[in-house]
Amino acid sequence: MNKMMGLTKRNILVYFKDKSSILFSMLTPLIVLVLYILFLKGTYVSAIENSAKGLEGFINTADIEKIAAGLLLAGILGTALITIPYNTLMTIVKDKENKVDFDISATPINRVNIILSYFVASAFSAFVMTAAVTTIGLAVMRIDLGFTVAANDLAGIYMIILLGSVSASALFMIAMMFFKTSNASAAFMGLLSAAAGFLIGAYVPLSEFSDSMESVCNLFPATQITVLLKRFLLSDTLFGINEKIGGVDGGTFVDGIKEGFSMNAFFYGRTFEMGCSVAYIFAIIILSVIVISMIYPRIYKRK
Amino acid sequence: MSAISVKDLTKSYGDHEAVKGISFNVEEGELFAFLGENGAGKSTTINILCTILKKSGGAISILGKDLDSNEGFVRDNIGIVFQNSVLDQKLTVKENLMTRGSYYGYGKKQIMENLSDIMESFGLDEMWDQRYESLSGGQRRRVDIARALINKPKILFLDEPTTGLDPKSRMVLWNYIDHIRQNDSMTIFLTTHYMEETADADHVVILDKGVIKAEGTPAELKSRYASNHLLWYAKNNEENEKRIRETEYRYVADHYDICHSGNITELLYKNRDVMTDYEVLKGTMDDVFLKLTGKELAYE
């Protein structure tokens, strides 16, 4: 166990000590932030204002900005949970390319633990980085907008981040098996970064897509994770707004926000409840682990 | 007991046979040199001995134990310096060595204890907190060797450890390796492109296209396969050529390079009246290699 922990520590250090790797893994979340500052905030605010027509006496500008900020943070976290695990796992490809795997294979660490150490390092790095972004983001939103999150929702957010870190690491472990060079994995990273924002609905709400497209996007665990994050992040804010409205609109404003900003995951007309989403993500993790345990030992086997 | 015993080792990649039934022994505490040009099968053999690759056939025992059924034992008792560094560029020397030590299940205290012998002599303490990427080529190689020694191995594999280093760094590195040999009586398995590095070897094996061409001590190999050279500084003319007609020679710049496997003193004595300016060069391992393989080693 100590041996595996040593290799895990090394894999974590390799990611955290490489500033360019951290920058590249945070590039998409940063782009989401920049786009928010440039125009997404305006789009969000105007869409929320449209939904709030007739309720101006109940919903103020601060409420609208809180919703927009919550959506921004969910977008940042959703993309980070794709790009950080991917970047951490690129160590597998780099180690093969530079024959570092030879050095590891000639030590007493067994093959299963070698594979496990990459997986744990990726999930850990993604969790730590994303949890830090969450904490900073929530603190800024609290100071700037008075944004609040109930204690149980806060726990939920960190649990979902953990689930997102583990599921993305499991899936990308499979992806890494197909790359022979770090150039190839970096090129795929470029594609992934560009697609991630759209895939999870950070740039455009998924509700703007066709039903088929939205359903396909919701097949990805990262999209489901983002949906769950939106729910936990905005639960307190939307509850407060609903309280203020006092049922005058029959709940249509909050329902409209949830639907318009894809706070429910749809799959061909059927809604994923929270339990269903979590179960689906767990199923993906288990399936990925089975695939990993079938294929990876062959890669690290003495040939 | 032999530190390494290899019998009829073969390794194939599909139809290509990289190692074709080689056998050799490495005695405990000796410096064993494994020579061959790129593609001769040296690294494949090392990787098999280090449990990285699987052999296709033959039998290997390391420190008296069968390699296939004692992989864990072998890994605990070997250290490897690879051709290219396998340490992490962005990590400090300390982080690199501490993490590598933990691969063997050691805690910080044990790692420091294992490194204590070489900490000062290798200058590790001076570069302890420096990033690996910021070190010079010679310093990096020292850290690579320290990494290979972190588990106090009984056998140290050095796979072209000095390739790419300047002559001074090479000399310094060899001083360190000698230091280790003297202090720990470690068995050293060396592959190198630099023939002069095999001069101190106890046993040399020359590999060509997966087969052993020759083996023995450097002196034995030189006496068997290398000729001495007499450089006679004289004008290139018929009269001079008459005197050395019986030998193999060529004229280079301002001298005759006379290749002579017999008694050079006799040749000199016979021509003492004209041979006033001369030089005698003893046969080298380069000559041995050239003679056996028909190729000179590529200095990369």
Image (tube, coloured by chain):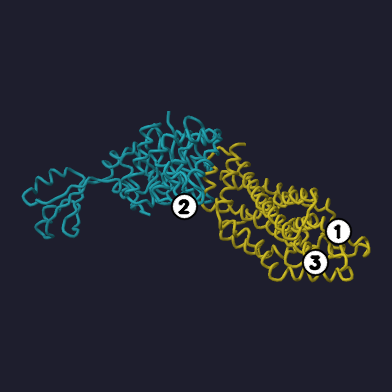
SS at mark 2 in the image: helix
Which residue is more in the foreground, B174 or B214? B174
Compared to residue B181, the image places residue B130 above or below, namely: below
Pinpoint the chain carrying mark 1.
A
For chain A, the rendered hue is yellow
Give the image location of residue A77, x and y in percent: 71, 57
Could you tell me the amino acid type at mark 1? Thr
**Could you tell me which quadrant the N terminus of chain B lies in?**
top left
Quarter of the rendering containing residue A40: bottom right
For chain B, the rendered hue is cyan
SS at mark 3 in the image: helix
User: How far is mark 2 from mark 3, CA to CA?
Assistant: 52 Å
Which residue is more in the foreground, A294 or B85? B85
At horizontal 56% and vertical 43% (from top left) the residue drawn is A302
SS at mark 1 in the image: strand
Pinpoint the chain carrying mark 2.
B
Q: How many marks?
A: 3
Compared to residue A212, the image places residue B144 above or below, namely: above
Which mark is on residue A61?
Answer: 3
Q: Mark 2 or mark 1, which is nearer to you?
A: 2
Pointer 1 residue: A271
Q: Mark 1 or mark 3, which is nearer to you?
A: 3
Pointer 2 residue: B133
Give the image location of residue B189, x and y in percent: 41, 39
A56 relative position to B202: left or right: right
User: How far is mark 1 from mark 3, CA to CA?
Assistant: 30 Å
Sort mark 1 into few (<14), some (14-19) or many (20+) by Cα contacts within 10 Å.
few
- First in sequence, mark 1 or 3: give its number: 3
